[in-house]
Amino acid sequence: MLVKAILISLVAAFAMFDYQLGTLYAFRPIVTCPLVGLILGNLPAGLAIGASLELLFMGNISIGAYVPPDEKVGSILACAFAITLGKGTEAALALAMPIATISLAISNVINGLMPVIVDKADVAAAKGDLKGVYAAHWAIGLVGVVKDVLLVGFAYYLGANAVQGILDWIPSFIMDGFGIAANILPAMGFAMLGRLVLKREVMPFFFLGFLLASYMNVPSLGVALIAIIIGIEKFGLLNPQANTDSPQLAAEGDDDDDF
């Protein structure tokens, strides 16, 4: 158990460091949960839970002063507890948001100390000390990594029995409801994505993929490869000269329109 707790805490460190390395979105549940499943010897469960939690946290975006729940810690611990206790996706869904909210509360307390480091960065920037700014940047990241590592490691190592008690206490109809929600979430997630990408220009390709998968039994990989080929042809990647010519023609047209 101790070794697994350490390895899972390292997954949390990896997720937190993603912010320091340019935010490559490696902290999302779709990435971290399969890693947890691999550590616990149940990769399929990690993939399934990661996909469901990704849809749960899809709108988990910081906008303005709003700070969303901590999907890193929430998804990692929810996945770890669900797999360890032999529960399914519904248990992970029941645990993820409360854990993420508690982690956010702890982060808010720790973030009260961050202005001290930020002030050091301001002083270094005023002096033109680039290394000092870098040091402040990594110091803030290190504080977050230590918090997540300790929180995830101790919570997993000490909290399995408590979580088991909570899951046993929750009525069965609530857990059944979470199971139904887990099946509905993929449709809702794709609908949310569809509102962003479905425009007249791309609608034919959307229905083309649907027809290929539904009526021609083309596997997902085949549909993806066909989409790549269409994208290459659509954007003229095999003929770069065509891309460089079109902006010039558009610019000439704009000049004519001005007159």
Image: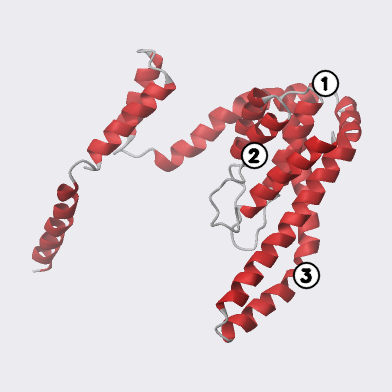
User: In screen coordinates, is 142 left or right of 151?
Assistant: left
User: In screen coordinates, is 114 left or right of 125?
Assistant: right
Residue identified by numbered label 1: 172
Residue identified by numbered label 3: 113
User: In screen coordinates, is 13 left or right of 207?
Assistant: right
Q: Would residue 232 be seen by someone viewing this image from the given angle?
A: yes
Q: Identify the residue at image location x=32%, y=27%.
A: 226
Q: Position of residue 24 (x, y in %)?
A: 53, 50
Q: Position of residue 120 (x, y in %)?
A: 68, 79
- Residue 32 numbered tag: 2
Q: Quadrant of residue 207?
A: top left
Amino acid on which the number 3 mark rests in the picture: Leu
Amino acid on which the number 1 mark rests in the picture: Ser
Q: Of label 1 and label 2, which has the lower sequence position?
A: 2
CA gap, disc 2 to disc 3?
28 Å
User: In screen coordinates, is 140 left or right of 109?
Assistant: left
Q: Nearer the viewer, residue 10 or 236?
A: 10
Q: Identify the residue at image location x=30%, y=30%.
A: 204
**Cβ atoms at labels 1 and 2 below 8 Å apart:** no
Label 3 vs label 1, nearer the camera: 3
Q: Would residue 207 be seen by someone viewing this image from the given angle?
A: no
Q: Nearer the viewer, residue 176 or 157?
A: 157
Amino acid on which the number 2 mark rests in the picture: Thr
